[in-house]
Amino acid sequence: MEKLGIQKVDLGLPGAGPFHIGHIDAMLTHMGENGYELRPGCAVRTVVSDIEPLVELQAKHERQIQASAFLGTSPIRQFAEGWTMERILSTAEKAVTFAVDNDIPVMFVTEDTTRSKPEDIKAVYTRAIELGADRICVCDTCGHVTPNGVRKLLTFIQDEVIPDAGVKRADIEVNWHGHQDRGLGVANNLAAVEAGADVIHGTALGVGERAGNAPLDQTLVNLSLMGVINNDLTALNDYMRKAHEYIEVALPHNYPVFGEDAFETGTGVHASAVIKAIKKGDQWLADRVYSGVPAQDFGLKQVIRIGHMSGRSNIIWWLQQNGYEVDDDMVAHIFEVAKGQRRMMSDEKVHAAIAEFQEA
């Protein structure tokens, strides 16, 4: 993760019990043994009992562990829970005070910020900042907001809430946390960057509750292509594969950038252009002539496939790349086989078609 330029990592929820605390402890040990500079944190309910394990873990590992203290503030959550703003403020005060008194850095997280009343957001952030929280997290917990809403909300936080709390904007780290319920996670992350957020949250493959969190991988890709970051992302594909393997979340063939089909070209005119660029020895051109994402930047490459919309150039290129001597009759045979396919042919299917031709 550090190689990719990721700076913060959430290690889990200690309030979920001893099993989870053990995992957090093990990850902190691993980070220490390997000299990782990632800033660790844990999600905690805004209650003292969730924060207490961090006091012990912080002392044991001799490194600060951020308490990401979350508390719902939207009217719908308040109604469902039977909460009042007085209770919310009292709850926040107890938890933030305990954390600050025990030298635990606090990121105060308002759940469902995007559906909360501005005056409620202002009241709870102001109190948290007054008590010593130097990080706040603005959340689209239910994947509700649009990019325009992100910009307006973050402008309100930075231009009104923070100054009115009596502190400078530079003294408060503003985090943005988005979800994918409406498929806007990445777009909202980019809007948050443009609006001035200091830290953007995401997860590998967008793993998370319901439709998931904003995909970290796609966020990094887009920030790189926009010139916002200059991170070396050639290892991002390996990171994605490991995440896919370990957490057993699907990596669809057509997943942007890292899906198996992301850089495959099968249509004749498109493939012909890519092949011509490669033959020129111009990989920069090959990566862009029919792709909005340069494969090499992310440790990947263009792949020419054969399908029902392919031309002879696809077939000839594939044969050459796979060590076959190009024969006009073989090309014609594969061409006819390809025309009967509903999808692009796998390498195994092309090899089978060649074997069929050779046996005829």
Image (tube, grey):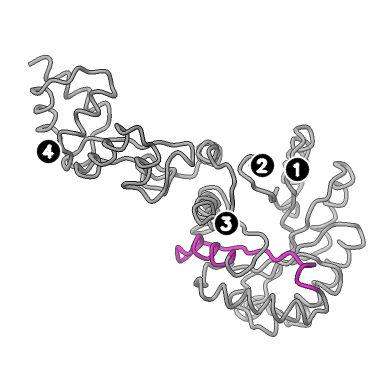
Q: Are marks 2 and 1 in contact (CB under 8 Å)?
A: yes
Q: Which residue is pictured at 35% across the width and 32% down the height? A: 281
Circle 3 or circle 4, nearest the eye:
3
Specify the amino acid type for callout 4.
Lys
* Cα–Cα span, label 2 and label 3: 17 Å
Does label 2 or label 3 sit earlier along the sequence?
A: 2
Q: Is residue 144 above or below residue 231?
A: below
Specify the amino acid type for callout 1.
Glu
* Cα–Cα span, label 3 and label 4: 44 Å
Residues 94 and 6: in front is 6
Q: Is residue 207 above or below residue 139?
A: above
Q: Which residue is pictured at 49% across the width and 41% down the height? A: 298
Specify the amino acid type for callout 3.
Val
Does label 2 or label 4 sit earlier along the sequence?
A: 2
* Cα–Cα span, label 2 and label 4: 47 Å
- Work out which quarter of the rendered image holds the C terminus and state it: top left
Residue at numbered disc 3: 228
Q: Is residue 177 located in the magenta-colored stretch of the structure? A: yes
Name the element at disc 2.
helix
Q: Which mark is residue 2?
A: 2
Q: Which residues are magenta?
A: 168-193
Does label 1 or label 3 sit earlier along the sequence?
A: 1
Residues 346 and 316: in front is 316
Residue at numbered disc 4: 339
Name the element at disc 1.
loop
